[in-house]
Image (cartoon, rainbow, N blue to C red):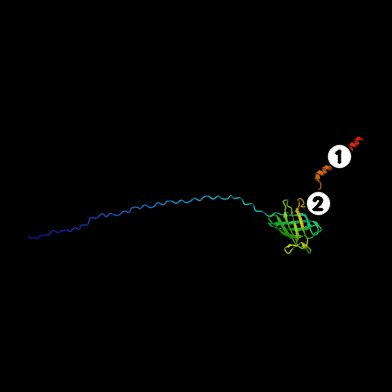
Amino acid sequence: MNFGQMTPAHTSVARKPAPVATQTAVPTAKPTATSVPTRVPTAKPTSKPPTHPAPPSASFPGVAGNYSGSIYNTPAAVNSTMILSQMQQQQGNVSGHLTLGQGLQGDGDFTGTVTKDNRIQFLVPGYLGHLPLFFEGQFQNNGSITGTYCSYQNNQCNNAAGGYGTWNVAPNGSPSASISPSNSIKGPFSAPQILFEDTFFVDQIKNYVVILKLSV
């Protein structure tokens, strides 16, 4: 039986190309430039000026309840007394009542101000047809006040239209703001010394009398 010539079957095996090892470029790390730290200049401490405590703020001078003293009218050459009574104060504002002594007119209530530099000023309304009186003065260390006054017209002194002069007062209960020349002691000795001299003189006379009696 002729089976004929059998051709062996060939299995065609597809050959895969052998993988070619490709050399992959490995990136080399590039050296990075090292950052040099910049020096920040340190701030030098600034020397602060020494701080001194602020001086205490000046305050308004305090007024007493009542003042008394003297006042002199220059054009009339009249020396009299004056009293500032019922004095009240609200910070820099003051008020009270003026009473003048014999020979002068101008009594009345007044309003005014005091300042932190120890000054005072006040205005007394016109009296019996006279112009208002404007007083200004300076506080002294002992609490007294010395100053000047004038007749006031058109917001200024008008010496030709009325009286003007000087004044001097002290708080009631304190030594008098003025001393009369008649009360002042003249001579090299004070009052206690003069009294001592007089007593010594009397004692000397007594001694002479005693001696005379004994001799007789």
Quarter holding residue 200: top right
Which amino acid type is marked by label 2? Answer: Pro
Q: Secondary structure at mark 2?
A: helix
Above or below, 106 against 173 in this view is below
Q: Residue at x 83, y 42 (%)?
A: 197
Q: Position of residue 76 (x, y in %)?
A: 81, 59
Quarter of the figure that contains the C terminus: top right
Give the crowd class for mark 1: few <14, some 14-19, many >=20 residues within 10 Å: few
Question: Of 182 and 124, which appears nearest the observer?
Answer: 182
Question: Of 86 and 130, which appears nearest the observer?
Answer: 130
- Left or right? Give the position of 35 relative to 55: left
| Residue 181 numbered mark, or none | 2
The residue lying furthest to the top in this view is: 215
Above or below, 34 against 203 in this view is below
- Left or right? Give the position of 62 relative to 188: left
Quarter holding residue 118: bottom right
Q: Position of residue 51 (x, y in %)?
A: 59, 50
Mark 2 to mark 1: distance in Å?
33 Å
Which amino acid type is marked by label 1? Answer: Gln
Q: Residue at x 86, y 39 (%)?
A: 204
Q: Secondary structure at mark 1?
A: helix
Give the crowd class for mark 2: few <14, some 14-19, many >=20 residues within 10 Å: few
Quarter holding residue 194: top right
First in sequence, mark 2 or 1: give its number.
2
| Residue 158 numbered mark, or none | none
Name the residue carrying label 1: 204
Question: Of 21 and 128, which appears nearest the observer?
Answer: 21
Q: Position of residue 205 (x, y in %)?
A: 87, 40
